[in-house]
Amino acid sequence: MPSNNEKRDRIELSVVILSYNTKQITLDCLSSVVRSLSEELAKKAEIVVLDNNSTDGSQKAIENYAKQHTLIKLIRSKENLGFSKGNNKAVQITKGAYVLFLNSDAIIKDRAIDKLLDVMKKSDDVAVLGPKLLNSDGSQQPSCGPFYSLPVVFAALFLRGDYWGLTRFSPCQFQKVDWTSGACILMKRALFEKLSGFDENIFMYMDEIDLLYRAKKKGYITYVTPDVEIVHLASASSSKRTFPILQVYCGLLYFYKKHHSTLKLQILKGMLQLKAHIAYFIGTITQNNYLMKTYAEAQKMVDMA
């Protein structure tokens, strides 16, 4: 019987996918991955799906699909671990020298995964690699950008930073970036382990940015390539807008507590409070209960931070 090390040596790429109440979307994702892998890479790849305690029949559906494709393995979580804990747990059972973190709402086009792996292999300078993301209609989706310095946060909150390309943009050339979207990230297992994985204090949002911030501090560079395209449906498992907004607030506050000075944290809190006050005021005069409820909770979150 081969040793565990020998088994690990035979797997080159591990694709890690988290699933949470997105049964058909996850099946579509898995189908696109299986279909896209070249015959050569498929022999050296594995797909590990961790289901975060879905209640929509996802686990059974994925299990049935996995019976048709032996490279797929399902992990059933008894609770919703979130993005960071879920990915960390899934990686622990993978064997590949390279790990591709892929959202369940991603659709792989052509030989995108093969191409990503080829790009990384050809350059020692590429520590982390992301593709160009597209919306379901084929339009470009902003998917990378600068780290969230105070000016960048201000642009995001008050200046429609994504629209002007100040906070996020879609790559038009192969280039270095501070961060790339967690919807699709390729990196070496050795680097992921050196960074101790995702910070499990972050439930979702800002998790990949924290990881890549720590990577850059150690001298590891993130790149994006527009030559590889992947469709990202975006927020498929976040059907309610309040939760994602609160998680962004929470993620920013945690990131600044962890990586920045007390002064910068206080300035951040001031901007978040101002944004919450403005949004709540607009909700009041327009009788928008969603705005009032969401930003009242956001304000409380900042006050308690």
Image (tube, rainbow, N blue to C red):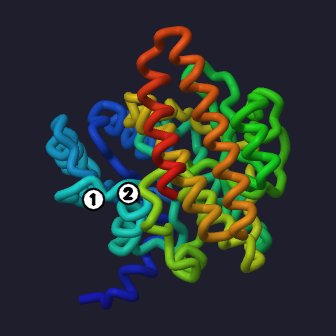
Tell me the amino acid under the disc marked 2.
Ile
In the image, 90 versus 162, the foreground residue is: 162
Could you say whether the residue bearing mark 1 is in a helix, strand or loop? strand
Q: Is residue 171 above or below residue 149?
A: above
Which quadrant: the N terminus?
bottom left
Vertical placement of residue 248 versus 45, above or below: above
Question: Residue at label 1?
Answer: 73
Tell whether label 1 touches label 2 (CB within 8 Å). yes
Res 276 → quadrant: top right
Residue 181 horizontal/vertical position (percent): 61, 48
Give residue 251's position: percent from left, percent from top. 54, 54
Q: Residue at x 69, y 44 (%)?
A: 271
Q: Amino acid at mark 1?
A: Lys
- The residue singled out by tag 2 in the image is 47
Q: Is residue 46 left or right of residue 262?
A: left
* Picture quadrant of residue 142: top right
Residue 121 seen? no
Q: Quadrant of residue 28?
A: top left
In the displayed structure, 212 sits above or below 72; it is: below
Q: Residue at x 57, y 82 (%)?
A: 194
Query: Where residue 164 sits: x, y (%)?
Result: 82, 30
- Given residues 2 and 129, the one toward you in this image is 129
Residue at 76%, 67% (x, y): give it.
221
Q: Quick one: label 1, few (<14), some, or many (20+) residues within 10 Å?
A: many
